[in-house]
Amino acid sequence: MLHPSVCFSCVSFLIRFKAAVSWYTVDLDLPPAKRWTAVITDKKADPLMLDTLPNPFRDEIKGIAAVSGVPLGEVVLFNIFYEVFTVCTSVVAEDDKGNLVHGRNLDFGLFMGWDVKNKSWIISEKLKPLVVNLDFKRNNQTVFKSTNFAGYVGMLTGIKPYVFTLTMNERFSLDGGYIGILEWILGKRDGMWMSFLTRSVLENATSYEEAKTLLAQTKLLAPAYFILGGNRTGQGCIITRSRLLSLDILEIDLKLGRWYVLETNYDHWKEPLFLDDRRTPAMKCMNTTTQKNISLKTMYDVLSTKPVLNKLTTYTTLMQVSEGQLESYIRDCPNPCMPW
Ligand SMILES: *[C@@H]1O[C@H](CO)[C@@H](O)[C@H](O)[C@H]1NC(C)=O
Ligand SMILES: *[C@@H]1O[C@H](CO)[C@@H](O)[C@H](O)[C@H]1NC(C)=O
Ligand SMILES: *[C@@H]1O[C@H](CO)[C@@H](O)[C@H](O)[C@H]1NC(C)=O
Ligand SMILES: *[C@@H]1O[C@H](CO)[C@@H](O)[C@H](O)[C@H]1NC(C)=O
Ligand SMILES: *[C@@H]1O[C@H](CO)[C@@H](O)[C@H](O)[C@H]1NC(C)=O
Ligand SMILES: *[C@@H]1O[C@H](CO)[C@@H](O)[C@H](O)[C@H]1NC(C)=O
């Protein structure tokens, strides 16, 4: 479906296709091995080196493997691939009334097989049916919500209602790059999987400031970008991480006219790779939209503009912290559409 839109004038055209994502509850009061039963049974998820992982992740993955019948090794592998083959766009913006909106496209499956006939990425297509919205509860109360793939226990996209919103984008970097993952495979387990950190932060941090400190200071296995939004004016940032430390924190700064922060997969102080510039079109679109008009709806339009939307885009999630709201859509990018 093609629609003209606010962004029509800035970049080629826009696709407003939406497919609903269903909701599941994950009960944090259950033992880790039992938490995912409903999601996995329902989605018949193919979940994935296990005894190497910390709890609660290890027991949750064991539970997933037990319910799905998929060999444990595959469940673990599946949980790790996300850390390596994901490219994304994330943006946190503040409107002129001080509301914070946070949107993201998750683009997954790069280099994992191109289907020539269908002009699509094989893995990206296979994952779409596994996209779920999750409501993590304790004492029957929501602790956090997320958009995720059934069978994956880390978090790439989530909200702690009324407190903060968080997404993670991959950072391809050679400074320390994947050495940590290599070391982890070889047995030296020093540092945390990035999406396990985001999960811990969503589950246990109680403020924007606490989340920011944990995301900036916890030792990781590989570099990453964390995009964090809070619940008060000025609370929105991109944390650029090396394995060991935070290299830079770019924050919303209304005094400087910076009413949004936007991250794809390149350090914001460097030019994006010319073959993969999703940043310029996305920023152009944000600038055309203006601070006055930014909302979940107009952010969806920005995230539906090619090539911000591309053949890898699996889902779009929109979050509004003040409403405790998370909504997500499975995406499809009809031809002609960039492979990434
Ligand atoms: C490619 O398209 C055909 C026909 O539409 C479909 O049957 C097949 O499952 C598709 N393959 C993938 C990998 O999506
Ligand atoms: C949990 O909360 C829902 C409404 O939020 C209520 O309908 C349900 O009965 C509660 N369940 C328990 C076990 O308290
Ligand atoms: C959150 O904190 C609780 C209590 O300290 C702990 O049991 C749990 O494992 C933590 N969750 C994560 C995902 O780290
Ligand atoms: C915003 O977050 C703080 C914690 O940083 C919390 O104390 C406060 O209640 C939150 N505001 C609202 C409106 O929920
Ligand atoms: C968007 O606006 C910002 C702030 O005015 C400016 O720095 C940036 O260059 C603009 N980007 C594009 C692509 O128009
Ligand atoms: C902002 O929204 C209003 C009302 O929907 C519309 O009339 C106006 O043209 C929009 N402004 C921009 C810059 O898109």
Image (cartoon, helix red, strand yellow):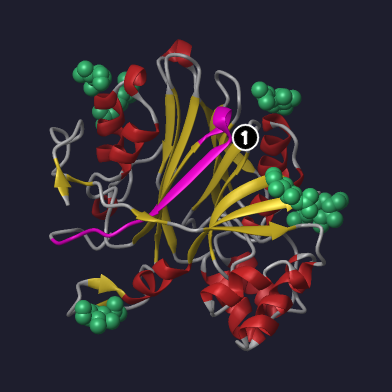
Instruction: State yes or no: residue 334 in magenta.
Output: yes
User: Which quadrant would residue 299 be assigned to in this image?
Assistant: top left
User: Which quadrant would residue 62 be assigned to in this image?
Assistant: bottom right
What residue is shown at x 65% (from left), y 57% (from top)? 25
- Image: 306 above or below 299: below
What is the quadrant of the C terminus in the image?
bottom left
Q: Position of residue 38 (x, y in %)?
A: 64, 70
Closest to the observer, 297 or 90: 297
Q: Position of residue 41 (x, y in %)?
A: 60, 77
**Left/right of residue 72 with respect to residue 298 in the rendered view:** right
Q: Position of residue 83 (x, y in %)?
A: 54, 64
Question: What residue is pinned by disc 1?
Answer: 164
Instruction: State yes or no: residue 52 in magenta.
Output: no
Residue 138 visible in the picture: no
Task: Classify the position of ligand 6 by quadrant: top left, top right, bottom left or bottom right.
Answer: top left
What residue is shown at x 70% (from left), y 30% (from top)? 209
**Left/right of residue 311 with respect to residue 258 in the rendered view:** left
Q: Position of residue 244 (x, y in %)?
A: 68, 50
Closest to the observer, 116 or 70: 70
**Left/right of residue 255 with respect to residue 152 in the rendered view:** left
**Left/right of residue 94 with respect to residue 176 in the rendered view:** left
- Image: 255 above or below 66: above
Q: Which residues are magenta?
A: 320-335
What residue is shown at x 20% (from left), y 34% (from top)? 7
Q: Secondary structure at mark 1?
A: strand
- Image: 325 above or below 85: above
What residue is shown at x 43% (from left), y 27% (from top)? 260
Using a 10 Å C-alpha cutoff, classify the residue at mark 1 as few (fewer than 14 neighbours), some (14 to 19) or many (20 or more): many
Amino acid residing under circle 1: Phe
Label 1 C-beta lies within 8 Å of the nearest ligand 4 atom: yes
